Image: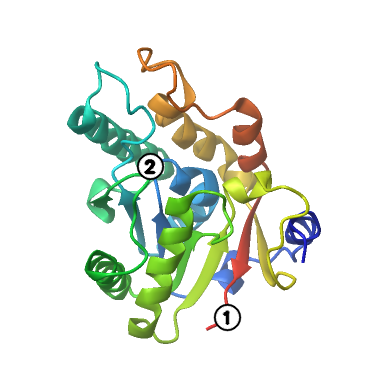
Amino acid sequence: MRADAFLEAVTALPVVPFETLVTGGLVVVAPHPDDESLGCGGLIVQALARGRPVRVVIVSDGCGSHPNSTAYPHDRLRNLREAETIAAMAELGLASEHVHFLRLPDGGVPSAGPEAETAAARIAAIAREAGAGAVFVTWRHDPHCDHTASAALVDRARPHLPRVAVYAYPVWGWTLPPEHEVGAAPEGYRLAVEDARAAKRRAVEAHASQVSGLIADDPEGFQLKPEMIDRLTGPYEWFIALPA
């Protein structure tokens, strides 16, 4: 199926109550700091409002966003992005002890080999500890290698998580060329998150290095475009059900 038709179908997935989407706790797996807020901020707010255990796993160290900054060399940038994530999750109501950083290399998250197996085992352990009924991870067709690799890590974790549902959330997938082939038509759900939009927007804005000119000495540095933020902070979040 072409990407344009697939994504149009995603926007028309049925709207369901939170309880249809998730039983028990949940884990959000994000390739980079900010993906968790962009893709699942409303989901996290609604889960916490219902007293559900929530865990967030940030896979990469996030240091690929401004690789040429002298003001923010690797360790300082990593620490900044982790602090931004903690602040973002506080906006959603999630305590810092429930945010886990795997610190794999940004732009080089492995999808196979010993490091990938270790990361997958950690994701599975976090999910079991939370009593997770569902795991959410970026869509494998997102056009970024770390998004694809994070989906592969969750695939590797699945044998250790029987009866746990897995959903994909598109982030950069919305920018795919229309003719790109992405497979069969989607199944899954939309979640109405109007009640959480303000908190979600604050969470996205807490990632200041990604949405503002905070780091000004890297002309090749990354910054989220306003239209991308607007698309992902609307009244719905989209979750594609992944078959076992």
Residue depicted at 77% across the width and 67% down the height: 1
Which of the pair 153/214 is nearer the observer? 153
241 vs 92, left or right, is: right
Q: Which of the 4 image quarters holds residue 182?
A: bottom right
Q: Can you identify the residue that label 1 sits on? A: 243
Crowding at mark 1 (Cα within 10 Å: few <14, some 14-19, many 20+): few
Q: Which of the 4 image quarters holds residue 52?
A: bottom left
Residue depicted at 73% across the width and 60% down the height: 10
Q: Position of residue 136 (x, y in %)?
A: 48, 63
Amino acid under disc 2: Pro
Q: Where is residue 99 in the image (x, y as percent from the top left)?
A: 29, 51
Which of the pair 21/227 is nearer the observer? 227
Q: Position of residue 148 (x, y in %)?
A: 48, 59
Which of the pair 208/98 is nearer the observer? 208
112 vs 193, left or right, is: left
Residue 222 visible somewhere in the drawing: yes
Q: Where is residue 184 in the image (x, y as percent from the top left)?
A: 72, 73
Vertical order, 185 against 78 (above or below): below
Crowding at mark 2 (Cα within 10 Å: few <14, some 14-19, many 20+): many
Vertical order, 113 against 213 (above or below): below
Residue 25 visible somewhere in the drawing: no
* Scheme of image coloration: rainbow
Amino acid under disc 1: Pro
N-terminal of the pair, mark 2 or mark 1, is 2
Give the Cα separation between the discs numbered 2 and 1: 27 Å
Q: Can you identify the residue that label 2 sits on? A: 33
